[in-house]
Image: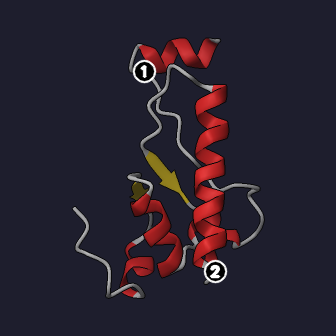
Amino acid sequence: AFLNRKAQQGLVEICLHGYTHAYHEFASRDADLLATKVRAGLAMLRDAFPAAEIRTFIAPYDVVSPEAIRAVLDAELDLCTASKNLAEAPDLPPLP
């Protein structure tokens, strides 16, 4: 209830930070698995924090594969990551 109120007031941002927080879980190259984890993680957060607008994904340990970046962008989330991760994904559109 506390975080929902703060999110509704625009004082906090609730972000998706992985699915299980396993070490390098978003380094996987399995696009289907990654898309499933992003969708499932979003569903859980939206259920737990109905007042929050979930907009941002932050990969655990800041390790994210090109396939994971695509899954995040396809879910219409912003990506918070180090630029070194983006250098390995040249087929993605330029990010703002």
Judging depth in this view, the residue of 15 and 38 nearest the camera is 38
> Circle 1 sits on which residue?
11
Q: Amino acid at mark 1?
A: Leu
Quarter of the rendering occupied by the C terminus = bottom left
| Quadrant position of residue 95 | bottom left
Judging depth in this view, the residue of 22 and 39 nearest the camera is 39
Tag 1 and tag 2, C-beta contact below 8 Å: no
Q: Is residue 47 above or below residue 54?
A: above
Quarter of the rendering occupied by the N terminus = top right
What percent of the width, then of the height, locates residue 5?
A: 53, 11
- Secondary-structure class at tag 1: loop
Horizontal side of residue 74 vs 92, given as left or right:
right
Q: Is residue 25 above or below residue 58?
A: below
What percent of the width, then of the height, locates residue 76?
A: 38, 52
Observer-side mark, 1 or 2, equals 2
Q: CA distance from mark 1 to mark 2?
A: 35 Å
Q: Residue at x 47, y 61 (%)?
A: 72
Sequence-earlier tag: 1 or 2: 1
- Secondary-structure class at tag 2: loop
Numbered badge on residue 30: 2
